[in-house]
Image (tube, helix red, strand yellow):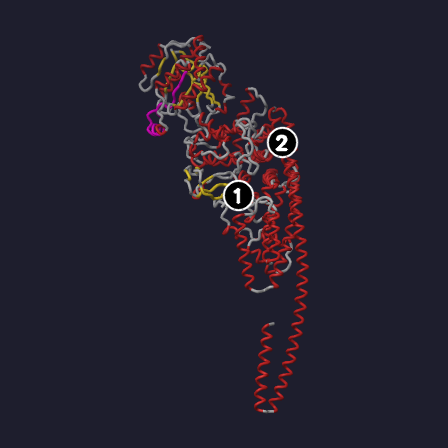
Amino acid sequence: MDTTMVNLWTLFEQLVRRMEIINEGNESIEFIQVVKDFEDFRKKYQRTNQELEKFKDLLLKAETGRSALDVKLKHARNQVDVEIKRRQRAEAECAKLEQQIQLIRDILMCDTSGSIQLSEEQKSALAFLNRGQASSGHAGNNRLSTIDESGSILSDISFDKTDESLDWDSSLVKNFKMKKREKRRSNSRQFIDGPPGPVKKTCSIGSTVDQANESIVAKTTVTVPSDGGPIEAVSTIETLPSWTRSRGKSGPLQPVNSDSALNSRPLEPRTDTDNLGTPQNTGGMRLHDFVSKTVIKPESCVPCGKRIKFGKLSLKCRDCRLVSHPECRDRCPLPCIPPLVGTPVKIGEGMLADFVSQASPMIPAIVVSCVNEIEQRGLTEAGLYRISGCDRTVKELKEKFLKVKTVPLLSKVDDIHVICSLLKDFLRNLKEPLLTFWLSKAFMEAAEITDEDNSTAAMYQAVSELPQANRDTLAFLMIHLQRVSQSPDTKMDIANLAKVFGPTIVAHTVPNPDPVTMFQDIKRQLKVVERLLSLPLEYWNQFMMVDQENIDSQRGNGNSTPRTPDVKVSLLGPVTTPEFQLVKTPLSSSLSQRLYNLSKSTPRFGNKSKSATNLGQQGKFFPAPYLK
Amino acid sequence: MEGQSGRCKIVVVGDAECGKTALLQVFAKDAYPGSYVPTVFENYTASFEIDKRRIELNMWDTSGSSYYDNVRPLAYPDSDAVLICFDISRPETLDSVLKKWQGETQEFCPNAKVVLVGCKLDMRTDLATLRELSKQRLIPVTHEQGTVLAKQVGAVSYVECSSRSSERSVRDVFHVATVASLGRGHRQLRRTDSRRGLQRSTQLSGRPDRGNEGEMHKDRAKSC
């Protein structure tokens, strides 16, 4: 526009100058020429004017379009708010139900465990509980779909933004926007989001944004999902590439599209910017969630056992409260097991379920700490697990372990056999052995099948029927014991370890065995453990695999967590009980294969239902900010 | 049970990895076990000649692990002698003789003769062991400690042996046990005593008779 004006102006000036020349020279031909030029100029001028008129029209139209979209956007926001509120309500309800189920489970467990004769009843009770869990997962399903809706709305918003930014195509503004965005993103990475109740907060951000600039709208997209709780956090976080991509399109983004864009670029942006995860290569184990802080009260570093002095920086895991030097973070024991909440239980009086936290993998902290300590310095010790440690020290440690909520410093225990004894004692004194009363027979029968394949299949089946806490703990223990058996220095091969752990984790088949059955049982117990130890490492490992994403989002650490669709599916958990699923499984090439797959899918189930409960808590809905 | 039959049942108990299986295998099979395998339950037989009489020994090997506490009692019935073993190089195993084994044998076979056996005698002078123990400010179990404890738990005798380095010391253990369970006098034992170079065997002056033993037992219970 400006340039055409300038052109016209210069043209006019030229004409005037020529006029002057003519006035001086008085040449008629030249004069005619000038008149013609004048005529040309007039036409050009007219055309330009018409054009201007046209553009003005266009602008008007665009403006009305914009306002229409604005209205739409406002509606969309309202809808999001409504959805969020509805979800909160649903989640609160879910949490309540979950609590009730937990209560029922506790009562049932306590009642039935005392008398082993009720194993049938127990079975049915367990089945009921499974169903309960599944249904809670189903509730999660509903919630999830609403989230998806919100996601689509959000993408709508982002479309709006891009439209506007095209309208105002000055590069300056664009740069400014970019900067602003980046700043936002980094902010949210460090601080995560507001404390509970920030729905309003994010909304207000959105509105201010509205008035000020379009680019901020895009930011709103980011926050809304993350406050929406773990699940949406993922979908809303735009990685830089995906953002640019949507920009380039400048068309309306379908919800699916935005989703897929996120999925398709999983980790590149994360890996360079995200410094929260521990660098350890843990193959999907639950990692620590470190926050660094300055030490005021001196604390001891768990991996190295040394003190962290006053005023120095230390890392503290937000979940399990493990403290370490920044240098020692690579050596921190894994997986991260959050401490128990609620009253501590005395060893020997509880079920395994009393000792596990609600986050998967469900392994008692005492088991994890012992195993980690043993793996750090015990793998060269001959007679590991065979030699017993000093009774008194073991007892003291035991008490300390469950009274104090932080992980005691096992690195300060000189005798590794004490730690082994501690672990064995813990397993031994559970009210119900690790392999449970009602499954011990199944395990023994499975172990006694002579055919290798069938026996393995039966083993898988039995393992898959274990409660999640038992199964996770068993898997963790087996992985560890396999490592022990592979270390020649320990002299503890599978057979030897089986002798130690046979009576420790396998129950007798009958409540009060007479000497003969007891004697027979012992042989079968050994066989069971031997078989369990011979199952492939990958099989056990899969129970340890928690999707890091899921944990992150549980922590509200949504920024760096791209979500894959299959996780979404598993998040709901199977609505059916495991047995039912077995029937349903389509791949039935061989029994053992099928069982393997089944058990592969099941761990997720509990694991997710866990996340569902976590969602129920308000605090998880809006993650707490990091402390710097 | 007093050995007219020429048969004798001996049960060997003691903490895990204190050398029970080695003791039995050296005696019954003349072979020090090469592999490292914890025992759950094992049976050995061997014959033994005392006073030109053949005695058939039926020996029961048990697990020292507390996780087999409920099965071990299956070995006790009708036993003539119980060998309570401990590891000379690990003083804590001596403690559990009093804490655990004495009570257990008393409960399940009050009539059997008890012989306290200190295993791994060669480790008493093993430098690595000494170094390891000195870190915890400990020393290997001394002969005197063993003797005192044997008296305390009401054992007929305290014997030390090394399955790894001295087969003779092992044979002496069973000799003592067999003789004790057959109710023989001590004369013969003293003779073997004098023959022994490496090993020492302390014969306690007279076995406490039943009444006394009961009293002693009570005292001990108090002291624990």
Residue pictured at 57% horizontal, 86% vertical: A20
Name above or below for residue A112 compared with residue B177: below
Where is residue A254 drawn, in percent x and y? Answer: 65, 55
SS for dot 2: helix
Q: Is residue A561 visible?
A: yes
Residue visible at 45% across and 28% down in the picture: A386
Q: Residues within 10 Å of mark 1 (few under 14, many from 20)?
A: some
Q: Is residue A596 visible?
A: no
Q: Principal SS element in the magenta part?
A: helix
Circle 1 — which element? loop
Residue to which mark 2 is pinned = A105
Name the chain under label 1.
A
Residue type beneath disc 1? Gly
Horizontal placement of A453 versus A49: left or right? left
Q: Which mark is residue A284?
A: 1
Looking at the rendering, in which quadrant would you find the N terminus of chain A? bottom right
Residue A86 screen position, x and y as percent = 67, 45
Residue A280 covered by magenta stretch: no
Which residue is at the front of the view, A162 or A365?
A: A162
Q: In this picture, which residue range is highlighted in magenta?
A: B115-132
Q: In percent of the image, x 50 and y 25: which residue is there?
A: B67
Residue at image point 58% right, 85% down? A18
